[in-house]
Amino acid sequence: MDSLGSISVFVQVAETRSFTEAGRLQGVSSSAVGKSIARLEARLGVRLFHRTTRSITLTSEGALFLQRCRKILAEVEAAELELSDAAAQPRGKLRISLPQVHGLVMPVLTEFMALFPQIELDLDLTDRMVDVVEEGFDAVIRTGKPRDSRLMARPLGVFHMVLVASPAYLQQRGVPQTPADLATHACLRHTFHATGKLEPWPLIREADAAEPRLPTRLVSTSIEAVSHAALAGMGIACLPDFMTREAEAQGQLCRVLAAHLQHVGQFWVLWPSSRHATAKLRVFIDHLALRLFPATQGR
């Protein structure tokens, strides 16, 4: 248990970059924290932190040790929770960051709220890349392969980007047969909020083919705004298939250039590996995996 105490202090120092703040969180003095780290370094035979009068940073050995320590603490806390009454009673607040795809996530979340009325959801709907640990989120839903070693991850399901337009638009402007034909069409583009860069369209290009010109009619940081414009007949949009499926079934949108697109994306739920998987977080993750993409059940 002595070792677990030292590991807990080490993780607090690594995350706060401060002996004083780590001591406050642990309920001990900063000098006691310093002595605990010194004893741990002596026992391991390596230096875990670079220390100056202004900053504390992890050494390469410290960064490697931190990954293991977070997993150890998470397992210990999970084991304790399994034996406590709290584990059987999901309750409390969950702070969640989600992408701005309300039509996909909100039905699943309102269903979760009905199933677990003692859990309060605090939702941050944004496309920016939040820092899960530093900003204090319990979990985030994001696309793309997770790269943050501080986070645990579980896949939720896959999606494909497709090019769509309304039947009225295609009747008026014609159906493009090759990517080069897009040069004569109105393109509705999504742009990333954080960088301002346009999201690229996943068009397959021949080795000697030039990049197709995409005349822009609309640019928006909201993918749902792009979808509305496509439904209104304003042009061709590149959208995830989960946003277009219902409109396609109702004949409101038609796919174009399907043979010239190549894309597979994946949704993940991520949560800090340094935190125990509380009952409220476990049931939230399980619900997402089961309901967000029911055809694949998160696999």
Image (spheres, rainbow, N blue to C red):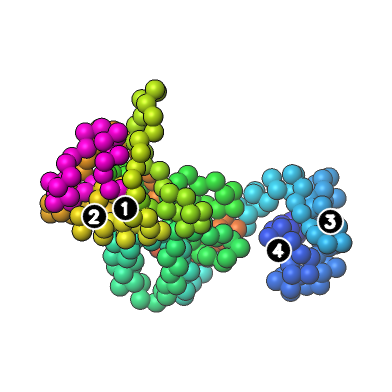
Query: Of helix, strand and loop, which one carries label 2?
Result: loop
Classed neighbour count for the residue bearing mark 2: other residues with Cα under 10 Å, few (<14), some (14–19), many (≥20): many
C-alpha gap between disc 1 and disc 3: 54 Å
Classed neighbour count for the residue bearing mark 1: other residues with Cα under 10 Å, few (<14), some (14–19), many (≥20): some
Callout 1–callout 2 Cβ contact below 8 Å: yes
Classed neighbour count for the residue bearing mark 3: other residues with Cα under 10 Å, few (<14), some (14–19), many (≥20): few
Mark whose residue sits in front, 2 or 4 = 2
The quarter of the rendered structure image containing the C terminus is: top left
Q: Nearer the viewer, residue 210 or 156?
A: 210
Q: Amino acid at mark 1?
A: Arg
Callout 2–callout 4 Cβ contact below 8 Å: no
Tag 2 or tag 1, which sits nearer the N-term?
A: 1
Q: Which residue is mark 2?
A: 234
Callout 4–callout 1 Cβ contact below 8 Å: no
Q: Position of residue 233 (x, y in %)?
A: 20, 55
Query: Of helix, strand and loop, which one carries label 3?
Result: strand
Q: Nearer the viewer, residue 202 or 99?
A: 202
Callout 3–callout 2 Cβ contact below 8 Å: no
Q: Amino acid at mark 3?
A: Arg
Q: Amino acid at mark 4?
A: Thr
C-alpha gap between disc 2 and disc 4: 50 Å
Mark whose residue sits in front, 1 or 3 = 1
**Residue at figure coordinates x 87%, y 61% from the top left:** 53
Q: Which residue is mark 4?
A: 16
Q: Is residue 219 visible?
A: yes
Callout 1–callout 3 Cβ contact below 8 Å: no
Give the extent of the magenta segment: 164-187
Q: Is residue 115 found left or right of 78 in the rendered image?
A: left
**Residue at figure coordinates x 13%, y 51% from the top left:** 168
The quarter of the rendered structure image containing the N terminus is: bottom right
Tag 3 or tag 4, which sits nearer the N-term?
A: 4
